[in-house]
Image (spheres, grey):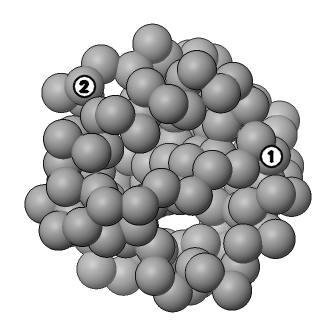
Amino acid sequence: MLNGRTALIVEEEFLIALDVQRMLETLGVGQTLFARTPAEAEQLRARWPEIAIAIIEARMGDALSLQLAQSLAAARVPTVLTTSDLDVQRDFADRPDLPIVVKPVPEDALAEAVRQALAVSTPRTSDWSW
């Protein structure tokens, strides 16, 4: 599915990030970029054009993660949110351009979210708010 391309994982917990990386490798990811925070992900902006998929940890009220998701969408990088906050899942349930997987991340749910994110051709970035 991802044909040796690059993924960006933004996740504070390194062990979770490694688990997500392993799951993405089963989908064909070749290289993974890691960031613990949205600010670290912004520092990788020069590499965004090579990113096939971004997986971003999100929490309700976390404006920096939302800004990062908006910036990635504007750069046409398909994005999936992961969260342990059910409010995030509810607030974005109607957003096919921003699939959400609830932690702990099941492998089949992540695969489906990645497929969904890749299938959406034009991300909608207006009216994003938390």
Question: Is 66 in front, or is 28?
Answer: 28
Q: Earlier in the sequence, mark 1 or mark 2?
A: 1
When the figure is inspected, residue 34 is found, relative to residue 16, above or below; the finding is below
x and y percent of residue 130 in the render?
75, 44
Report which quarter residue 21 is drawn in: top left
Mark 1: few/some/many CA within 10 Å (<14, 14-19, 20+): some
Residue beneath the point at 18% across and 27% down: 108
Horizontally, is 108 left or right of 105 in the view? left
Q: CA distance from mark 1 to mark 2?
A: 23 Å
Residue that badge 2 annotates: 107
Q: Nearer the viewer, residue 121 or 92?
A: 121
Q: Residue at x 34, y 34 (%)?
A: 22
Which residue appears farthest toward the left when viewing the image? 1
Q: Is residue 84 visible?
A: yes
Under circle 2, the secondary element is helix
Residue of label 1? 37
Quarter of the figure with residue 5: bottom left
- Left or right: residue 46 compared with residue 22: right
Q: Residue type at mark 2?
A: Glu
Residue 44 position, x and y percent, is 72, 72
Does residue 12 appear left or right of residue 61 in this picture?
left
Residue 86, given in percent of the width and then of the height, sits at: 56, 17
Within 10 angstroms of label 2, few (less than 14), some, or many (20 or more) residues? some
